[in-house]
Image (tube, grey):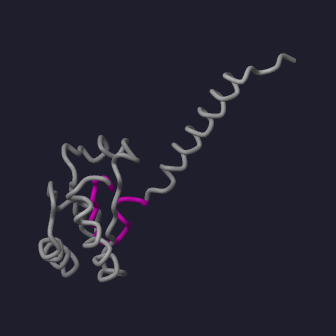
């Protein structure tokens, strides 16, 4: 049996680890929209300035709406396939789904807490 050269070994190692991380990424994503629950999906990037500004708001809302609405963030730089899936043209983009899974609102850009709460309250009450 022929020995693998160091370059071939490194190539195989890199491609295998890339494939593993790609398949792992898909498994990390939750089902959107969450079955039977109002869902707010925020598509952005951890290094995007408006996205960074929204991060603490989303963290608070996740706690406040636990059991009533799902608040989900997807980093589109890590999950590039989601850009096409959700037809994203700019980040951040927020997509709101009612409890039946229908998209009811889409917003592009920074969205303050009051505006998000207004939308969530209408959807949770309906």
Residue 28 x, y percent position in the rendering: 49, 56
Q: How many marks?
A: 0
Location of residue 107 with respect to 68 vertically, above or below: above
- Name the quarter where the C terminus is drawn: bottom left
Corner quadrant of residue 123: bottom left
Residue 55 locus on image (x, y percent):
29, 67
Q: Which residues are magenta?
A: 30-46
Coordinates of residue 115 in the picture (x, y in percent): 12, 72
Residue at screen point 22% across, 78% down? 124
Which of the pair 38/28 is nearer the observer?
A: 28
x and y percentages locating residue 33 in the rendered image:
33, 62
**Quadrant assignment, res 89:** top left
Q: Is residue 26 magenta?
A: no
Name which residue lies at 30% across and 44% down.
83
What residue appears at the point 48 percent right and 49 percent down from the top-left corner? 26
Query: Residue furthest toward the front?
Result: 6
Write the residue at 15% across / 65% down.
111
Considering every residue shown, the one lying at the far right of the view is 1
Q: Nearer the viewer, residue 79 or 98?
A: 79
Q: Quadrant of the N terminus?
A: top right
């Amino acid at each position: 049996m022929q020995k693998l050269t160091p370059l071939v070994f490194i190539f195989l190692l890199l491609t295998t680890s890339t494939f593993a991380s790609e398949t792992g990424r898909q498994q990390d994503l939750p089902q959107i929209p969450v079955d039977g629950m109002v869902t707010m999906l925020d598509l952005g990037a951890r290094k995007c300035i408006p996205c960074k500004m929204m991060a603490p708001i989303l963290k608070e809302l996740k706690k406040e709406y636990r059991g009533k609405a799902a608040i989900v963030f997807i980093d589109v730089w890590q999950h590039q396939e989601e850009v096409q899936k959700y037809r994203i043209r700019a980040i951040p983009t927020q997509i709101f789904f009612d409890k039946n899974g229908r998209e009811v609102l889409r917003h592009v850009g920074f969205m303050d807490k009051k505006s998000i709460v207004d939308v969530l309250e209408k959807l949770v009450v309906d």
